Image (tube, grey):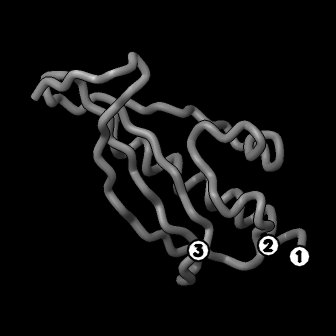
Amino acid sequence: MNFTYFNEEDLLYQIEHYKFRLKNSPVADIKLLIFFNGDNVYNNYSYEAEITDSKVPIEYKSVSATDNSLKTEIGAELTGIFKTKEDALQDAINTISKLMDHYTKNT
């Protein structure tokens, strides 16, 4: 599949949905973003997450792999774009776990 876009920055991508439980409690909904090149070959991944736990302040309820404010707040090392689905999902798990740990200790 090849698509023609109006703008250079335009992009079509696929989304897969995941739920994350921490210590057997639901804490986040994760959207895995799957980017592909013009030959329909998947080659880059990223994520966005909605935190569902009430301990996290509203400004961190929506996070992404490129969220610099989150990096500053909890010291997360965010990569942004990943070469494999597993790397993106593992980073989402690590970031959400670190965020939850940060706010569980401080509440």
Vertical placement of residue 79 versus 63, above or below: above
Query: Hey, which quadrant is residue 19 in on the image?
Result: bottom left
Viewer-proximal residue among 5 and 34:
5
Kindly identify the residue that appears in the image at 45 percent across and 40 percent down.
46
Which residue is denoted by mark 2 in the rendering? 104
Q: Residue furthest right?
A: 106
Which residue is denoted by mark 1 in the rendering? 107
Residue type highlighted by circle 2: Thr
Which residue is denoted by mark 3 in the rendering? 27
Is there CB contact under 8 Å for labels 1 and 2?
yes
Pinpoint residue 78: horizontal percent, then vertical percent.
62, 37
Viewer-proximal residue among 74 and 16:
16
The residues bearing labels 3 and 1 have C-alpha atoms spaced at a distance of 16 Å
The residues bearing labels 3 and 2 have C-alpha atoms spaced at a distance of 12 Å
Question: Which label was assigned to residue 51?
Answer: none
What SS does tag 1 mark?
loop
Vertical placement of residue 50 versus 15, above or below: below
Pinpoint residue 88: horizontal percent, then vertical percent.
44, 43
Kindly identify the residue that appears in the image at 57 percent across and 74 percent down.
22
Kindly identify the residue that appears in the image at 73 percent across and 79 percent down.
54
Between label 3 and label 2, give the one nearer the viewer: 3
Q: Horizontal placement of 7 versus 56: left or right?
A: left
Q: Earlier in the sequence, mark 3 or mark 2?
A: 3
Instruction: Give the class, few, some or many, for how many residues have Cα within 10 Å of label 3's Cα (few <14, many ≥20).
Output: many
Is there CB contact under 8 Å for labels 3 and 1?
no
